[in-house]
Image: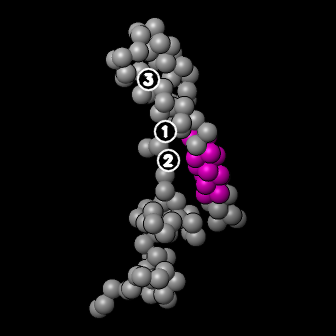
Amino acid sequence: MRTNVSFNLQRRKLIKEYLQRLRFQSIEIDYFFLKILTKNKIIPKQSRALAVFYLSFLCSTITKTKQKNVCLRSGYRRSVINKFGLNRCFARNEIGENFFPGFSPAKR
């Protein structure tokens, strides 16, 4: 019973982070565009103030730095290699089995 509860909590965290990534993707272009407008000294002050006003309405909890990397296989959050989307243990095993062309296991 206890392992089932911890699995459900881990699953909920993964779903929450996935939804957070989707929200960030939908807002990302507007966010960066408004950030550029607020720092632009050429456009009038009224337009910059309006950009700051709209920027304040975007959710501040949805930023790129708040997103956590998660291993695609295990759901582990630490030591994830972005190139593969796996943590170091799974990536090492798969490199050893030659799943990734161009990579070879470390020699011992």
Q: Residue at x 65, y 52 (%)?
A: 15
Disc 2 + disc 1, Cβ < 8 Å: yes
Q: Where's residue 80, x and y in %?
A: 44, 64
Q: What's the residue type where badge 3 is placed?
A: Leu
For the image, the number of numbered tags is 3
Which of pointers 3 and 2 lies earlier in the amino acid sequence? 3
Quadrant housing residue 79? bottom left
Q: Where's residue 64, x and y in %?
A: 47, 43
Q: Residue at x 41, y 21 (%)?
A: 38
Quadrant housing residue 45? top left
Q: What's the residue type where badge 1 is placed?
A: Thr
Please give the residue where the numbered disc 1 appears in the rendered image. 63
Image quadrant holding the C terminus, namely bottom left
Q: Residues within 10 Å of mark 2 (few under 14, many from 20)?
A: some
Judge depth for marks 3 and 2 and give the one in front.
3
Disc 3 + disc 2, Cβ < 8 Å: no
Please give the residue where the numbered disc 2 appears in the rendered image. 67
Tell me: residue 17, above or below residue 52: below
The CA span between labels 2 and 1 is 7 Å
Left or right: residue 38 versus residue 3 is left
Quadrant housing residue 29? top right
Q: Residue at x 47, y 33 (%)?
A: 32
Q: Where's residue 106, x and y in %?
A: 33, 85
Magenta residue span: 9-24
Of residues 39 and 15, which is closer to you in this image?
39
Please give the residue where the numbered disc 3 appears in the rendered image. 37
**Please, which colouring scheme is shown?**
one colour
Q: Secondary structure at mark 2?
A: loop
